[in-house]
């Protein structure tokens, strides 16, 4: 396993269920954390818990390229490049077609797909200059397999999966690794706004999902874990 000690790790969506649990584990391993999300108060609470200095916190709405670029230029004024970028942002809009609005569809694409594109535009070139880095995205099983009601969400997550696979093709002469983790139902606030009857007690816990990401951050340098699937034992969609 590669050591995380002193690695520069950026988590976007750090205030979420999976993002915050991942931040805790990565901090314990001695990495330098950079944390981003929209909600400043939540970010500051997490930063206080993990002793992350305020200059490493970024209020970022991934739908806004300016926000992403500002965070990137502030980070790159201190370090040449992020070693590990974890994109744990995401929005779940699950509705049947008759209820799904154009706004729902565009919002899903903006957060889950266009946001990831902006992150790549802002952070990839410095990684390429350094020829090394690891980028972890969370397309989820709905980025690989269909579900009724997931037209907008799956469009964004299949898109994310496809975009990252294409970028991987461009990076074959570098040591930049692209990892997609496909989680099934995970018990986080993600589900709070989704009108669907789910059995949260059967879900993967946020801590277990975070342990998988923490493991992926330490993947062997002689290879790459290009994909990982972790889903509830009783509800295996793939
Ligand atoms: N939970 C599941 O069952 C599950 C399964 C498969 C995949 N996933 C994926 O895993 C990732 C993390 O999900 P989670 O379960 O941890 O969800 P969560 O608890 O709802 O967290 C989502 C995170 O994304 C941030 N976020 C939302 N919109 C944003 C925006 N426009 N700009 C910047 N940050 C934004 C939120 O912070 P702010 O609101 O402060 O911005 C929060 O930190 C998502 O990509 C999700 O699709 C989740």
Image (cartoon, helix red, strand yellow):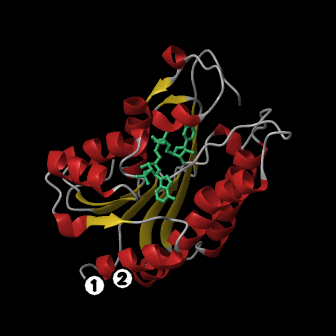
In the figure, is residue 196 to the left or right of 215?
right
Q: CA distance from mark 2 to mark 1?
A: 6 Å
Q: Secondary structure at mark 1?
A: loop
The dot on residue 67 is: none
Discs 2, 1 touching: Cβ within 8 Å: yes
Q: What residue do we see at 61% from left, 48% from top?
A: 139
Report if the beta carbon of the residue with label 1 is closer than 8 angstroms to ligand 1: no
Pointer 2: what residue?
A: 73
Vertical position of residue 136 compared to residue 71: above or below:
above
Residue 136 at x, y percent in the picture: 49, 55
Q: Quick one: label 2, few (<14), some, or many (20+) residues within 10 Å? A: few
Q: What residue do we see at 52% from left, 22% from top?
A: 203
Q: What residue do we see at 72% from left, 56% from top?
A: 103
Residue 39 at x, y percent in the picture: 36, 55
Please tell me how many numbered marks the rendered image carries.
2
Pointer 1: what residue?
A: 77
């Amino acid at each position: 396993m590669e050591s995380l000690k002193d690695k520069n790790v950026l988590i976007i969506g750090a205030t979420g269920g999976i993002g915050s649990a991942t931040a805790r584990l990565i901090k314990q391993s001695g990495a330098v954390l950079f944390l981003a999300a929209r909600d400043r108060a939540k970010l500051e609470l997490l930063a206080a818990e993990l002793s992350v200095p305020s200059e490493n916190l970024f209020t970022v709405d991934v739908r806004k390229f300016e926000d992403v670029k500002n965070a990137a230029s502030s980070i790159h004024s201190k370090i040449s490049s992020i070693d590990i970028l974890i994109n744990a942002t995401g929005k779940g809009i699950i509705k049947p077609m008759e209820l799904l609005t154009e706004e729902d569809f565009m919002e899903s694409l903006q957060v889950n797909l266009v946001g990831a594109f902006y992150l790549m535009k802002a952070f990839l070139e410095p990684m390429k200059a350094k020829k090394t880095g690891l980028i972890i995205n969370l397309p989820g099983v709905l980025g690989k397999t269909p579900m009724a009601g997931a037209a907008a969400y799956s469009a964004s997550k299949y898109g994310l999966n496809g975009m990252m696979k294409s970028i991987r093709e461009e990076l074959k002469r570098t040591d930049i690794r692209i990892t997609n983790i496909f989680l099934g139902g995970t018990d986080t606030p993600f589900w709070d706004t989704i009108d669907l009857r789910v059995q949260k007690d059967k879900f993967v816990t946020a801590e277990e999902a975070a342990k998988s990401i923490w493991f992926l951050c330490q993947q062997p340098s002689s290879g790459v874990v290009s994909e990982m699937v972790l889903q509830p034992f009783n509800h295996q969609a793939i």
